[in-house]
Image (cartoon, rainbow, N blue to C red):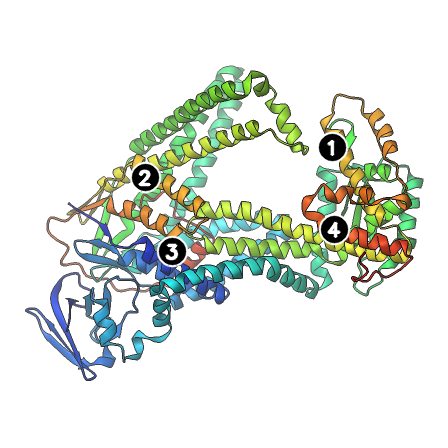
Amino acid sequence: MKALEFNGSGTEYFKIWIVNILLTIVTLGIYHPWAKVRNRRYFYGNTELDNANFEYHATGKQLFFSYVIAMILFLAYVVLSQVSIVFSVAFPLIFIFVLPWILWRSIKFNLRMSSYRNVRFGFDGSLGGAYATFLGYPVGLFIAFIIVMAVIVGLIGSVMGMMTPAIILASILGLFFYPAYFAMINKISNMYFINGAQFGQGDFSTELNFKTFFGIAMKGMGLGLLLSFLAMIVIGIIAYLTIGLEQIAMMGEQIQQMEEGAEPDGMFLALIFGVYAVLILVSIYVAAYFKARHRTYVFGETSLDNSINFESTLRANKLFGIIMTNLLLMIVTLGLAYPWAVVRLYRYSIESINVGAPDGLDGYMSKAGNEGALGEELGDAFDIDVGGIAF
Amino acid sequence: MIDGKLYLAGRSDFSPAKLYLQAGGFQLHAEGNHTVTGSIDQLRVANRLGNIARKITLPDGSVFETKDNDAVDTAFANNNQSSGFMGFVHMLERNMALAIFSIFITAGVLFASFKWGLPAASHVVAHALPASANQALSGNVLAFLDKYFLDESQLDEQQQEKIRQHFIDRIVPLYLAEDAPEFKLHFRLWPLGEDGSIPNALALPSGDIVVTDRFIELAQYQDEIDIVLLHEMGHVVERHSLQQVIEGSAIIIVVSMAFGDVSWLADMGVGVGSFFISSFYSRSHETEADQFAYEHSLHAGINPASLGLILTRMEQDMLFDGSDSSSDKTNNKKSKPDTEATDPNEANDESLSGYFSTHPSSAERTAMGKRFQTCFEQGLTVCPETNFK
């Protein structure tokens, strides 16, 4: 197995980044698609496997048209939703129904515009599959859950007259619903994406099961609860030692007084800040845990043409360490450290990917076909990530 | 001579290759394969980016790839393709001094456009839009407020009618522009807690002005009601709601473009940033509405000091009402205003600036209040900027 390498540097990227921002401002935003292309090209071009690099091929001109459409839609949405409450609800609803199409186009376009060793990637997942993955399952499962809950409470509770057991049963189901939902969506979206992806004439394939994802979701949730609980105990002890029991008991009153404009107590503010900081830290850690575990599992089950294998060595602790130091760096430098932070994070997530190709990668050939860029930029302007996919 | 590798069109296998360029022509030798020759104009050279491998596409679609970027730059220096706009961009990117310079330009431009550009632009745009755009904003806002926040007024009909008639006869005619909306006065009770209520006055872009019962109770002189109503009319006339919509939209778009790649950062940026910026803008809107109120108050012989007095009283009423929930409310309400009764005509500097001085950034508002107060005492109906003590 060989590891991917990243040859970019924060300093070099810093210059590209700042010039991108400058030109985007000077051109009143028109340069944005070209800036995006340069960004992508830099990261793809510096990513190497076996002494050959990846490449991003889209041009600014290609992205420009859909960027303009996306901006007009976005502007219309922002302005109109401030004006009309009805519109601000209706627009996202309509958008949800268009979203799978946008995501589908976006995946297709982005893969087709990427290459390794002169051979393009591709995607042949169906539009129907996109609707099932990004709309059918997420919404359907949720509706199914609500129906089940209603039936339990309605049938067992009201009709059969056993309200207490019905509520207990419903609560237990509710507790398991979130991790189960999360696991199912992850399984479906990863399988849709990977099984549709191609490298030249070669097909990626994977078979993922719900049980493993559910196990990861339960462990992650447990971890989050445990960490929050421990942190709260520590904060509680510190609060007890520094501001005393009486003050803690008066917390509710203090909050009310602050809302009415009273000067807040320093210690009290520190306590509130501490609680928030801990919750944010825990949620970042849990997110890192999910990312690491998902990638290890999904990569391990993925192959290209059943001959080329993948492996992820991403570790939650190290990922968490990088995210935290990045966050600190950005705060200290008022955001100027952004390019270095991005490069560090990208480097780690790339260099923790191993590829095993016992028969080499010769013999792959690009497939013909062209895609418009509309979906891709629409997704970008509305700030959509293809959620849950492990890459 | 440039060292690299040659990929045949669309294929992943490659062979080491060398590219020779001279006198407008090229020669490419691929190991164990073939030799291609042609004119240098037939080659498509990718523009340079950092030090990523450079691609040169041949007429037949095969690709020569090299890491020797500098050699490519030198060899194609006389060829138009490698210069052009992207060549200029690369020149910017190579230069650290320029990059650092860019930080300052970027920061300067952003600062200037948020401080002056955006307010000016939104002012122009808001006034250029037809009055119907402004009115569209009001939509069902009053119905919405009635449903969730406001109750019917408890003031007796006669008092309401008296205030309304005074407003229509005396205050509305002070502003007689062509585009003036039809001003209407609405009385409402804004309940707070079990038996408290909030003193407030607010204006909708349509010209509907809502005053709460508690505000009327707190006002001790007709001048105080009048000047607050003028202040609210100022918000309507200056189209502040529309400006806020424009400013808010612009901020959201700029922030989400700058941090587009990191969504969590964008969320944080939009939240925190737009809070600070919009409170900055709304302060300048308050100042503008003050100015409108002061200017028109001089014409009508309304004492400008009334604004500071009533606003102070309203704020203290809110603080007093909320923090001391255990004591007897009705008693408080009766006794409190009395302790503060100050005839606006006897107002001194201290009471005038009372409200504004508790809001540290409002030095400008205080200064303006004092300026108009001076003019009022001198019996002027127009108060020039220079008339500063």
Q: Disc 2 and disc 4: Cα gap in Å?
A: 51 Å
Query: Where is residue A137 shown, x and y percent of the image?
Result: 41, 40
- Disc 1 + disc 2, Cβ < 8 Å: no
Query: Where is residue A73 shown, x and y percent of the image?
Result: 52, 58
Query: Looking at the image, is A206 positioned above or below residue A48?
Result: above
Which three-letter amino acid code belongs to the residue tagged 4? Answer: Arg
In the rendered structure, the residue with mark 2 lies on which chain?
A: A
| In this rendering, the label closer to the viewer, 3 or 1 | 1
* Residue density around tag 3, few if under 14, some if 14–19, many if 20 or more, within 10 Å: many
Residue B185 visible here: no
In the rendered structure, the residue with mark 4 lies on which chain?
A: B
* Residue density around tag 4, few if under 14, some if 14–19, many if 20 or more, within 10 Å: many
Left or right position of B98 against A390: right
From the image, tell me which residue sits under label 4: B365
Q: Disc 3 and disc 4: Cα gap in Å?
A: 52 Å
Query: Where is residue A59 shown, x and y percent of the image?
Result: 35, 66
SS for dot 3: helix
